[in-house]
Amino acid sequence: MRLLNVDSQELDTFYDEGIPPYAILSHTWTRDRKHPEVLFEHMERPDRVHMLRYGKIEQTCRLAKSRGLDWVWIDTCCIDKSSSAELSEAINSMFRWYTNSSICFVHLEDMGDEGENLANCRWPGRGWTLQELLAPPAVEFYDKRWQHIGDRSALAQDIQSITGIPTIYLQEPRRDIRQARVGEKMSWAANRVTTRKEDTAYCLLGLFYVNMPLLYGEGDKAFLRLQEEIIKVSGDDSIFAWSPTNGILGLSHLWGKPIPSEESQPFSPFPKPLATSPRSFRCLQHKTLARVPAMKAATTWGMTKGHLQEALATV
């Protein structure tokens, strides 16, 4: 894991038990091509401090230092994205990195003027920020001037109304998100967007405690692979509780009834029990599914070569 020192603002690499306490930043990448984010390759340049977005790094370091922390992790400058191996490792490790952080600072650069609120910001609607909201032990929100807005617990009601995530997973003492059903967590991602189509799946790896190789260019198949990996480790049948038409919760798609495809495509490579994207789980938004005893995943059902192995007797 590569971290940035809050004093020297130089990068250093740490491994496993040698990783020191650190703060972590959650933000949205700028769309301004004239003034881009400060990336890993910029960190070797002395003039990086004059880049417009370098202030984001300085403010993160300032906040971390005020909490007695010497290191920070920022996705823009702490990952060498020119290395596909490093990028894959980072994405598969990211949920754990947020979980193991001391605190997460959320910077809302589109909030701060009169009339602006969290609902109008880009941050709650991005795919990657879901894990950044839920994984860290503590989350604090700051506006574009780095004025403190509140923490995750204080803003829980607002976050719930915007994202559909129940306050029991936001307010202290929080319920462990591992207690949430698979379908319920999928619904939290239903309205979120990512720049790359594959990231719709990759940004959810940690939320479901699975790992898989990244194959940029595979398109919608990434979400299929994600569901198959979840099925391998989970006996939660709510992964099938999706609606192709975003309508009433139901499982009629399992039985081959003629329901219009969500994507309005004449042919889909997806096995019928599996959804094509998190959007199909909108039917579960603002619902808390009852917790049920885990099924015998290994013997009751599973995926084999993209096909459901046995009938869903428990549905």
Image (cartoon, rainbow, N blue to C red):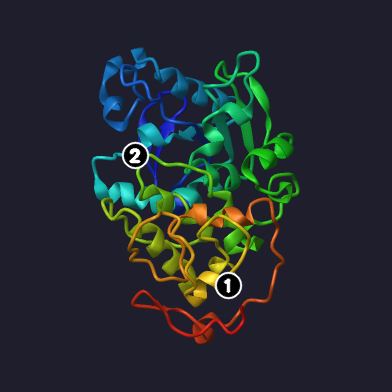
Which residue occupies 35% across, 25% down?
Answer: 38
The numbered mark, 2 or 1, whose residue comes first in the sequence reads: 2
Q: Could you say which quadrant of the image residue 227 lies in?
A: bottom left
10 Å neighbourhood of mark 2: few (<14), some, or many (≥20)? many
Residue 59: percent from the left, percent from the top? 51, 21
Dot 2 lies on which element? loop
Residue 111: percent from the left, percent from the top? 58, 21
Q: Nearer the viewer, mark 2 or mark 1?
A: 1
Q: Quadrant of the N terminus?
A: top left
Which residue occupies 32% across, 18% down?
Answer: 48
Q: Quadrant of the C terminus?
A: bottom right
Check whether the beta carbons of the residues at disc 2 and disc 1 lie within 8 A of each other. no
Residue 263: percent from the left, percent from the top? 41, 54
Position of 171 with respect to 115 (left or right) is right
Q: Which mark is residue 306?
A: none
10 Å neighbourhood of mark 1: few (<14), some, or many (≥20)? some
Relative height, residue 199 to residue 115 (above, below)? below
Which residue occupies 31% across, 53% down?
Answer: 219
Position of 89 with respect to 187 (left or right) is left
Relative height, residue 116 to residue 78 (above, below)? above
Work out whether residue 15 can be spotted: no
Observer-nearest of 244 and 57: 244
Amino acid on which the number 2 mark rests in the picture:
Ile
Residue 275: percent from the left, percent from the top? 46, 62
Q: According to the image, label 2 marks what residue?
A: 79
Q: According to the image, label 1 marks what residue?
A: 237
Which residue occupies 69% across, 55% down?
Answer: 287
